[in-house]
Image: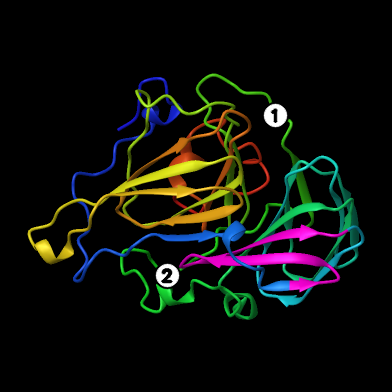
Amino acid sequence: MYDKSDPRAALAPLGPNRAVPSGAYAPPSYVRFYETPPQDDGPEGRTWYARGQNFVVLHTEARTGARFERRGQKDEYALLLPDAATSAVVTAGDERVACEGHAVVFVPPGDSSIEIAGAGRVVRLFTTLSVDLVARCPNNDAYARPNPLIPPFEPWPAPRDGYRVRRYGLDVSGESGRFGRIFRGSTFMVNYLDPRHEPRDITKLSPHHHDDFEQCSLALDGEFIHDLRWPWTPNMNHWREDEHAFCGSPSVAVIPPPAIHTTRAQRHGLNQLVDVFCPPRLDFSRKPGWVLNADDYPMPEGA
């Protein structure tokens, strides 16, 4: 259910039947990076980890000159450079690409490195095929039993002209009827939501649910309350209490299907949320003009 002013109100309605798991619904997972010591603390900077069923998020307070390498990376990954003052040189194969900050970058499989110029925030997104990174996540216990409502991960097709380093700037003007700033690769969809500079109007919320995929809400700036409610089933043992979870920044909230959810910005000042989906969302991809780099990455055959 969306307020009529929300561009998502134009999405095709979901089917009438929701999947019901054989056991209880999966809970959400909240990882508040600001509350805990980093998993990595060394010359490159301080890095916190979190995961969902299909993905891993690395949030780094990087030092100038930090270098992050991947060897034999199995699939494409994403790099977020939230701040204009923090740029990176990304090397992959024979490519060496200078990437200005305030951008989303997709990095090819195989060997790659990221060299940081200008200390600042760096976010990297990997699928759980990167088992070495999965092992560092403090919320692994939440995924000891996979959520049966989420299908096994399948990547989307490779770029039409082959894998390469692709930078997409976030200086994109808003457009009536378009939702956020959406970019997709073969493994991730990143929706850099329009920033809010005051608490959200509680008369114009957007409670909605997803049948078969998680939503990762990455808070980069500000404060948020994630409101969640689960549908009732005939078996009362499946029921869960409503949640109204406060998350400052930086933090990750992983919202499982089919929880009904909406998020409220709380701060007077910058509130910046980034929604991450792994693999990309089909419904957003079907909306003309919503995915800003749609010409580079095809949708699955038949979609």
The label shown at residue 172 is: 1
- The answer to the question of whether label 2 and label 1 lie on touching residues, with beta carbons closer than 8 A, is no
- The residue indicated by pointer 2 is 152
In the picture shown, does residue 2 fall above or below 53? above
Whether residue 255 sits left or right of residue 108 in the image: it is: left
Location of residue 33 with respect to 207 vertically, above or below: below
Question: What residue type is disc 2 on?
Answer: Pro
Q: Is residue 93 left or right of residue 253?
A: right
Indicate how the structure is coloured in the image: rainbow
Q: Secondary structure at mark 1?
A: loop
Q: Percent from the top left, x then y, of residue 198?
A: 54, 26
User: What residue do we see at 83% from left, 67% from top?
Assistant: 44
Q: Give the residue drawn at x 54%, y 73%.
A: 138
Name the amino acid type tagged 1.
Answer: Val
- Tell me which label, 2 or 1, sits earlier in the chain: 2
The range drawn in magenta is 41-63
Q: Residue at x 70, y 66 (%)?
A: 47
Q: Is 56 contained in the magenta span?
A: yes
